[in-house]
Amino acid sequence: MKHLHLALAMAILVMWTPAALGQFKVTSPDGKRLATAKDKVITLTEVETQRTILRIFGHTAEITGLSFSRDGKLLASIDESHTLKMYDTTAGRELWGVKANFGGRLSFSQDGSTLNVESGHKIKKFNVETGAEVH
């Protein structure tokens, strides 16, 4: 019975995380900007002043993940239809968009040349400049 209560409490906590509410946040590597995805919109905010820098309306499905490049100049996003997109964080301009065929956690490689989409034991890598899958 004790384990059942603990499991129920943990399930409730997981249900109320921002990800479960359809909102994702990621801070730029320099800590100066915050990218927030809610539904299909990404909002870039200046952390110090809370001023909105730009809004990006590039997705047609709910966004499920975000990641800044190591230099903060790029922002990758993925949505529930597994569409992966890359944006310039200065202008909010879409650089490319591709189908990843599965969703998951986004991360840039150490050298910044590839973007990884990780789901369980599956990992796909995409060229940061072109969006082409790297094998």
Image (cartoon, rainbow, N blue to C red):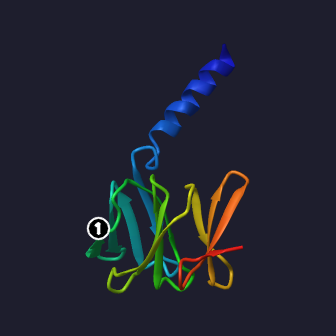
Expressed as whole percent of the image width and height from the top left, the position of residue 6 reads: 62, 26
Confirm whether residue 55 shows in the render. yes
Name the residue nearer the viewer: 129 or 63: 129
Question: Does residue 38 appear left or right of residue 102 in this picture?
Answer: left
Q: Position of residue 74 (x, y in %)?
A: 47, 81
Query: Among all residues in the image, which is located at the extreme top?
Result: 1
Q: Nearer the viewer, residue 95 or 50?
A: 95
Amino acid of disc 1: Phe
Residue at the spot 54% in from the left edge and 77% down from the top edge: 131
Count up the numbered dots. Answer: 1
Q: Which residue is mark 1?
A: 57
As drawn, 112 above or below 117: below
Quadrant of the frame with the N terminus: top right
Q: Secondary structure at mark 1?
A: loop
Vertical position of residue 17 compared to residue 126: above or below: above
Q: Quadrant of residue 56?
A: bottom left
- Asked if residue 55 lies left or right of residue 72, the reply is left
| 135 versus 20 height, above or below | below
Whole-percent x, y for residue 120 in the image: 69, 51
Q: Who's the residue at 44% across and 62% down the image? A: 25
Q: Residue at x 47, y 37 (%)?
A: 15
Which quarter of the figure is the C terminus placed in? bottom right
Quadrant of residue 70 in the image? bottom right
Relative to residue 74, is residue 37 depicted above or below?
Answer: above
